[in-house]
């Protein structure tokens, strides 16, 4: 319930829209009631053979309500669809705005596409928030109110009787079915998550399952799970299927009860018999508004669950907070790590401990070391995705936590191993790096990055997640973006790992040329492939989160330490392969 | 609003529950007529005869009885439709799974991640409203109005004719609505799924956006895109909803005409109150099923779009495997050569061959290295050997037997495969290993673990072998996953091995350990390696160089170095780079 209230809070700007749509819905059902009511009035009145004029109000009512019902319904459908779209768009913006400060540190758990897909699925579920959850009870309440007023005119007893049956339909039925259904929702979601992992295993692990002759086993287990799910669905359907019938029974119950109350009053003349027909028809028509209510309870639950999951994500504390009044960006772009330590949350070993490192403007520095040594953590800290646990990082002498994170990041051009391309054109993907770039500049950047083949295809769709480009091409797209960004600091994080030897060489040359152009750029390269190492002013060797050695290539080689042993391992005359010399 | 032919076919497989559902609902409709008759009699008695409650008690009791019967019929009708729907869903689930398993890993791998599982998990479920609601309603939208007509005609011909007169308008509008509603729901559905696809894209790329300092300005673009979609969709809906407006109006106008006409006739004394009121009460139930058809069609639409995905999958032609005549005993890999005899394969139906005219022999106990640029056909070759694909042309012979005549299960019993990116199942580490050999003893497990050097990793985990892995479990690095896959191969202990060497991009220390384990694994076995390093290629018994789907060169290192061609050129350029 808490979640629903929070969701309602979120869609506050649309309260008027919702109210409008609900009132229209009420007016449409009300017209339906009016149509039946005035028809009944004509017929009943006519049976008494009064002067013709007395039939006229009924005839006018029939015409008015007959036309109004359809038209109001039409307007209501448009209004409620419009409201739904507005709410959805608002929720998306809300979610994005709240999650943006959390990325990427707090979203690491959601790295895999499937989980993100579930998030978007949850937001899609909220599509039903207005039309299925908020609107039905609102409309029912209004219709109920109308009927109480109408019947109260005759006798408060009628209102009371009707109130009992309306309350039973609106509250009793959902409570009853909720009670009968208790526990099934939890059982269902457990079954479904079991099915989800089994299905993923079955599809993504299909080659292993085939090889080890276990596929039939797995398919059998899945079928078994599905049967259990369907059995549970059957139970739910049996209960939910009774809603409509039970609402119908309540309607008929209300009719019988009213007849019982009416009969004595008509026979003793308190109430004109004409109205018996009118009252009963109006009561019957009013139950139309109660039909969608049990369904609303179900949607309420679904919305609450979806909302809960979303709130859980959104409520995380951001790993870093932007300064309220950021200082002006310094002229100099020298980077300095001072005694920086860092541990990822929920881990015991620190990822970095006591790192001090200076990269002066225009310097080229390489960070090397075995995987898991903490190389990429340095980039994450520099980009201010995380806050150091201890120590500080400065650029041009200013601590980076006093700078605007956006302008900090726009001054660091980074190419990492994983390049994300948006489902947009190649041009749009490039313009991300520099929105005002001309086509000429885009083409130049593509050529520089070794993607001449793309210069004529700027408008081509980069595809869903850039799937129409190969791994190497995507890497080069990232390099083209970096060229466009023209930042004073360049970070390459295993950037050329997916490229073949020759391309890697030419790409590196391009980047070096770019770096040496005035004003000189600082270059930070993270790699475990030791190649062309003499171009770097300094090489920093990391192991287990701390700096083991530091210095230019020749010095380190002479030192005969960790670096030298890594170098010789990779530069044996013939690197060892799988097949030993026979 | 025509029913989808393929989906209708499914109903024909389980017709009984659906027929029962429609019949029961029709019985419910008949009860409704009885109820209406009783109710009009009650009101007639109250109003005109000023009857006391005692006099109408019998009528009220009957009315209550009819109500209960009607509720019962309607409930069972829904349950029957639900029963049929569940059967169909189960059938489809089985068929889709069977199809995926017979299409095999190559097909599963070619699909966008998550698409197949979405079809299985969500696609089939979204068909539910189509079968449980739309299909029965299709029949009821004819049967129920007919029942009402049967009741009205004997009582008041004139009103019956008016209903009949407005009735032809309805099929006419149905056609219009069918088209417009289809367009509207399609549009709405597209809008929603495009908006959510777009949103997913933005979420996944959020880090990239942040890197360029552009994440905050995306907020505006999300709202602009949503706004644009909303406006476009509303434009379509404005037109599409018009047709159901007309349908509503026909219903309302029909009711109005009959009400006024009956009223006037009662007034002039040509018809009594009771039949008049009876007819009036029935009119809404004449139009209601037709109006409902629109809403239920709307509910079923999503299923129709999902059906397209399901049937694209189900209609995929299956590889033409000949069922092997009889179960054979295990293949004798250690003595029998495998021969590729002019094998060709194409993924599409045109002439773009992934493999063409491939001839080679894999001698027992030897090591074959496969090399060549990416896209040259190496993977297809391996997939044929693993029987994930069957040759389109030529044949693969195992000794004198065509591989086609050996069942895939029997063949794979003797094969192990260590890919570069092995999949880990969402279960414990132990289960992940036992996949390779059900019922392996603790000692066998230990041996496999130590051979693949997994001990330090497993010992570092508090729960050891019982640690869950996968999406919800411990994070496992690529290197550890590869070692787990190696351990599986040790457990499976098969005479034929297919290995993907770790690439030179792997961390050098890690790479050394993996290579050492692999060496222990292939000792004394027939091995096929996708080779990435010079030394492996150099020391293999046989080297196959692939390019553009054919074997361009084959032989040993020495013989190939003497030849002018791809191999020698590649060797030279690689050595140059490596020397730096």
Image (cartoon, grey):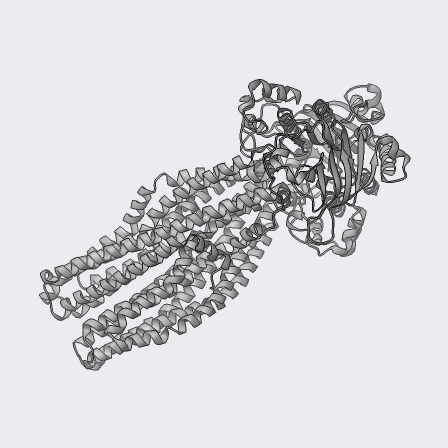
In the picture, measured across the screen, residue B84 lies left or right of residue B426, that is: left
Q: Is residue A34 visible?
A: no
Q: Is residue A17 left or right of residue A58?
A: right
Q: Quadrant of residue B299?
A: bottom left
**Residue B31 figure quarter:** bottom left
How many numbered marks appear?
Answer: 0
Q: Is residue B22 visible?
A: yes
- In this orientation, which residue lies closer to the viewer: A116 or A229? A229
Relative to B555, is A49 above or below? below
- Residue at point 54%, 37% (across, down): A216
Quarter of the picture containing the C terminus of chain A is: top right
- Residue B505, position as x, y percentages in the image: 74, 33
Quadrant position of the N terminus of chain A in the picture: top left
Q: Where is residue A283 in the image (x, y as percent from the top left)?
A: 25, 61
Q: In this view, does B404 lie above or below B178?
A: above
User: Is B480 on the left-hand or right-hand side of A574?
Assistant: left
- Taking B110 as reference, is B173 above or below it? below
Q: Nearer the viewer, residue A71 or B144?
A: B144
* Residue B449: x %, y % from top left: 62, 21
Q: Nearer the viewer, residue B168 or B288?
A: B168
Q: In this view, does B468 lie to the left or right of A441?
A: left
**Residue B376 % position (x, y):** 76, 43
Quadrant position of residue B169 = bottom left
């Amino acid at each position: 319930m808490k979640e629903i209230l929070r969701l309602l809070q979120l869609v506050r700007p649309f309260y008027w829209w919702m109210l409008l749509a609900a009132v229209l819905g009420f007016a449409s059902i009300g017209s339906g009631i009016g149509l039946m009511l005035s028809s009944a009035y004509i017929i009943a009145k006519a049976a008494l053979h009064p002067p013709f004029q007395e039939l006229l109000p009924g005839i006018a009512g029939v015409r008015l309500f007959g036309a109004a019902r359809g038209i109001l319904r039409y307007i209501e459908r448009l209004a409620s669809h419009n409201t739904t779209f507005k709410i959805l768009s608002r929720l998306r913006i809300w979610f994005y705005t709240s999650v943006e400060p959390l990325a990427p540190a707090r979203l690491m758990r959601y790295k895999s596409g499937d989980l993100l897909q579930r998030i978007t699925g949850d937001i899609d579920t909220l599509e039903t928030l207005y039309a299925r959850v908020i609107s039905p009870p609102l409309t029912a309440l209004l219709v109920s109110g109308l009927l109480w007023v109408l019947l109260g005119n005759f006798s408060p007893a009628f209102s009371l009787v009707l109130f009992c049956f309306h309350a039973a339909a609106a509250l009793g039925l959902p409570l009853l079915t909720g009670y009968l259904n208790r526990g099934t929702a939890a059982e269902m979601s457990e079954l479904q998550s079991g099915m989800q992992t089994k299905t993923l295993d079955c599809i993504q692990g299909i080659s292993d399952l085939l090889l080890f002759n276990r596929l039939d086993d797995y398919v059998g287990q899945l079928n078994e799970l599905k049967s259990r799910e369907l059995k549970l669905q059957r139970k739910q359907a049996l209960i939910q299927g009774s809603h409509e019938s039970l609402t119908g029974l309540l309607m008929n119950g209300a009719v019988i009860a009213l007849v019982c109350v009416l009969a004595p009053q008509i026979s003793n003349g308190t109430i004109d018999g004409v109205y018996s027909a009118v009252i009963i028809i109006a009561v019957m028509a009013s139950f139309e508004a109660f039909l969608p209510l049990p369904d609303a309870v179900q949607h309420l639950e679904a919305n609450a669950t979806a909302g809960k999951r979303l709130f859980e994500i959104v409520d995380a504390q951001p790993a870093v907070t932007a300064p309220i009044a950021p200082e002006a960006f310094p002229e100099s772009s020298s980077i300095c790590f001072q005694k920086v330590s860092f541990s990822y949350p929920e881990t015991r070993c620190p990822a970095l401990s006591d790192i001090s490192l200076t990269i002066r403007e225009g310097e080229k520095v390489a960070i090397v070391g075995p995987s898991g040594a903490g190389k990429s953590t340095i980039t994450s800290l520099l980009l201010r995705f995380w806050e150091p646990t201890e120590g500080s990082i400065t650029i041009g002498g200013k601590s980076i936590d006093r700078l605007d994170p956006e302008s900090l990041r726009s001054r660091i051009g980074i190419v990492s191993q994983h390049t994300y391309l948006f489902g947009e054109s190649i041009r749009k993907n490039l313009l991300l790096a520099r929105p005002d770039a001309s086509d000429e500049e885009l083409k130049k950047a593509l050529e520089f990055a070794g993607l001449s083949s793309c210069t004529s295809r700027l408008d081509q769709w980069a595809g869903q997640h850039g799937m129409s480009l190969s791994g190497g091409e995507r890497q080069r797209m990232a390099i083209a973006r970096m060229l466009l960004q023209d930042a004073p600091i360049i970070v390459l994080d295993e950037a050329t790992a997916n490229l073949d030897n020759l391309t890697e060489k030419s790409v590196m040359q391009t980047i070096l040329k770019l770096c040496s152009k005035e004003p000189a750029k600082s270059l930070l390269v993270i790699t475990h492939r030791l190649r062309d190492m003499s171009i770097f002013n300094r090489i920093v060797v990391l192991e287990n989160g701390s700096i083991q050695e530091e210095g230019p290539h020749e010095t380190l080689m002479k030192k005969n330490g960790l670096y030298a042993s890594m170098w010789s391992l990779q530069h044996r005359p013939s690197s060892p392969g799988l097949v030993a010399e026979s | 609003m025509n029913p989808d032919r393929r989906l209708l076919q499914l109903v024909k497989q389980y017709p009984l529950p659906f027929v029962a559902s429609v019949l029961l609902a029709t019985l419910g409709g008949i009860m409704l007529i009885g109820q209406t008759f009783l109710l009009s009699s009650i009101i007639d008695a109250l109003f005109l005869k000023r009857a006391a409650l005692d006099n109408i008690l019998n009528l009220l009791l009957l009315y209550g009885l009819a109500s209960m019967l009607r509720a019962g019929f309607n409930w069972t009708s829904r349950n029957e439709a639900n029963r049929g729907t569940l059967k169909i869903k189960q059938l489809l689930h089985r068929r889709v799974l069977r199809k995926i398993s017979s299409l095999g890993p190559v097909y599963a791998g070619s699909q966008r991640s998550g698409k197949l599982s979405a079809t299985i998990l969500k696609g089939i479920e979204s068909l539910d409203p189509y079968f449980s609601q739309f299909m029965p309603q299709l029949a009821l939208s004819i049967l129920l109005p007919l029942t009402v007509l049967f009741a009205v005609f004997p009582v008041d011909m004139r009103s019956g004719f008016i209903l009949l007169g407005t009735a032809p308008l309805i099929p006419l509008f149905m056609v219009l609505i069918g088209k417009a509603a289809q367009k509207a729901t399609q549009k709405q559905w597209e809008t929603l799924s495009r908006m959510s696809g777009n949103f997913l894209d933005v979420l996944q790329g959020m880090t990239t956006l942040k890197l360029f300092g552009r994440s905050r300005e995306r907020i505006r673009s999300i709202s602009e895109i949503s706004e644009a979609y909303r406006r476009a969709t509303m434009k379509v809906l404005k037109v599409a909803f018009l047709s159901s407006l007309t349908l509503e109006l026909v219903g309302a106008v029909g009711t109005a005409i009959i009400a006024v006409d009956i009223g006037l006739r009662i007034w002039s004394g040509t018809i009594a109150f009771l039949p008049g009121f009876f007819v009036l009460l029935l009119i809404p139930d004449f139009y209601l099923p037709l109006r409902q058809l629109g809403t239920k069609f709307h509910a079923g639409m999503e299923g129709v779009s999902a059906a397209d995905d399901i049937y694209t999958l189900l209609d995929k032609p299956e590889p033409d495997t000949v069922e092997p005549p009889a179960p054979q005993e295990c293949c004798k890999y250690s003595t029998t050569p495998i021969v590729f005899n002019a094998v060709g394969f194409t993924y599409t139906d045109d002439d773009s061959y992934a493999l063409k005219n491939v001839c080679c022999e894999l001698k027992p106990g030897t090591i074959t290295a496969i090399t060549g640029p990416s896209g040259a056909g190496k993977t297809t070759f391996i997939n044929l050997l693993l029987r994930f694909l069957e040759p389109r042309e030529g044949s693969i012979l195992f000794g004198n037997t065509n591989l086609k005549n050996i069942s895939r299960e029997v063949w794979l019993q003797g094969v192990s495969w260590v890919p570069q990116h092995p999949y880990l199942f969402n279960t414990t580490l132990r289960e992940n290993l036992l996949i390779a050999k059900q019922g392996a003893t603790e000692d066998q497990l230990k041996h496999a673990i130590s051979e693949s050097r997994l001990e330090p990793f497993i010992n570092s985990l508090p729960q050891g072998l019982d640690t869950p892995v996968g999406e919800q479990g411990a994070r496992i690095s690529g290197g550890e996953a590869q070692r787990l896959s190696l351990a599986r191969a040790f457990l499976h202990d098969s005479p034929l091995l297919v290995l993907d060497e770790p690439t030179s991009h792997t961390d050098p220390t890690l790479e050394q350990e993996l290579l050492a384990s692999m060496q222990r694994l292939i000792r004394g076995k027939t091995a096929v390696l996708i080779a990435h390093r010079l030394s492996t290629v150099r020391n293999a018994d046989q080297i196959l160089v692939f390019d553009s789907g054919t074997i361009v060169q084959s032989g040993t290192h020495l013989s190939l170095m003497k030849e002018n061609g791809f191999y020698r050129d590649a060797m030279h350029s690689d050595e140059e780079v490596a020397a730096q």
